[in-house]
Image (cartoon, helix red, strand yellow):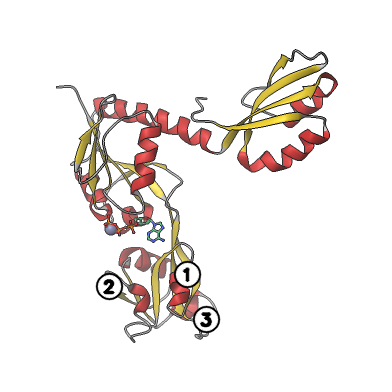
Amino acid sequence: MSTVLRLAIQKSGRLSEESIKLIKECGIEFSSGGGTLKSVAHNFPIEVLFLRDDDIPGYVADGVADIGIVGENVAVETRKKLTTVRQLGFSTCRLSIGVPKGMEFTGKESLNGMRIATSYPNILSDYLFENNIKASIHEISGSVEIAPGIGLADAICDIVSSGSTLISNGLKETEVVFRSQAILAACPQLSADKQAILDELMFRISAVKNAEKTKYIMLNVPDHAIKTVTNLLPGVKSPTVMPLAEKGWSSLHSVVKESDFWEILSKLKEAGAEGILVLPIEKIVK
Ligand code: ATP
Ligand code: ZN
């Protein structure tokens, strides 16, 4: 039987949708609906396992799965031996300290002597150790943010994305303890066959990620302005220039970073560009 790489992803939760989307954008077809627990891809040597996120680091470290997509917060907290293959840029969040709104808090030193409730005792204890803070950690598994209100703790250390849960529980965010995003993690010992499949997958993921923050731009430019406009559009190499049927005009095609787009746009118009079209790019192979 030929080798198959086993990929663990979250069954249902904040990582699931983006994980499935990424693999599908890599051109890998597999079914993911309903109560599927595992699914073999039709066109790539990969098998997808659907698991609870907390179980993914352990399965990958033990080699039950070869690779997995999981939050860095969970990967680090479990202290399993994993290789981080790459960060994936989604499911970003942070682990922060929250204290009651009215509490005087002058910096992390204020945590000395406090009882801090968290579901992340390992990450928190590393943070306290690194910052030379003596505080006690009170491990609870859920609804951490109510702990100060019911007298269980003085402060909390919990996941924050927008901060609204903290506010609605009368807390304020003070210190960021850990920044997290989804990562692709691998078992430290992969066979050569499996490593080769992972390399191909990584190549595809890079192509998808490179394309994510870029747009394809097409515009019409009077010939005398081609040089000015070309300088505004660095592109992958340099823009493609094609003559239009109308004399004295050309069509330019290039790639721009989304973050630069609005600034470039006004300059393009100033330079005389017209009929500007901007399209999404699916993949970029460098
Ligand atoms: P499971 O049922 O698989 O155990 P869960 O409830 O533990 O799921 P989710 O809430 O789906 O986990 O979160 C999964 C990951 O998404 C988190 O570990 C974290 O890395 C990331 N994440 C991003 N934003 C948030 C947020 N606002 N709250 C919680 N997790 C977030
Ligand atoms: Zn979980």
Residue count near mark 2 (Cα–Cα under 10 Å), binned few <14, some 14–19, many ≥20? few
Query: Please, what is the three-letter code of the amino acid marked with disc 1?
Result: Ser
Gap between marks 1 and 3, in whole Å?
A: 20 Å
Return the x and y of residue 9 as percentages of the image width and height.
Answer: 29, 44
Q: Nearer the viewer, mark 1 or mark 3?
A: 1
Mark 3 beta carbon near ligand 1 (under 8 Å): no
Gap between marks 2 and 3, in whole Å?
A: 23 Å
Residue that protrudes farthest toward the front in the picture: 246
Q: Is residue 139 above or below residue 34?
A: below
Q: Is residue 175 left or right of residue 47?
A: right
Q: Is residue 126 above or below residue 222?
A: below
SS label for mark 3: loop
Q: Is residue 80 above or below residue 119?
A: above
Q: Write down the residue under mark 2.
A: 140
Residue count near mark 1 (Cα–Cα under 10 Å), binned few <14, some 14–19, many ≥20? few
Residue found 37% across the figure and 82% down from its top: 148
Quarter location, residue 229 = top right
Query: Please, what is the three-letter code of the amino acid marked with disc 3?
Result: Phe
SS label for mark 2: loop
Work out whether mark 1 precedes mark 3 in sequence or the reverse, and give the earlier one: 3
Return the x and y of residue 158 as percentages of the image width and height.
Answer: 39, 68
Q: Nearer the viewer, mark 1 or mark 2?
A: 1
Q: Write down the residue under mark 3.
A: 105
Residue found 73% across the figure and 42% down from its top: 263
Work out whether mark 2 precedes mark 3 in sequence or the reverse, and give the earlier one: 3
Q: Quadrant of ligand 2?
A: bottom left
Q: Are marks 1 and 3 in contact (CB under 8 Å)?
A: no
Gap between marks 1 and 2, in whole Å?
A: 20 Å
Quarter location, residue 232 = top right
SS label for mark 1: helix
Residue 164 disc label: 1
Q: Nearer the viewer, mark 2 or mark 3?
A: 2
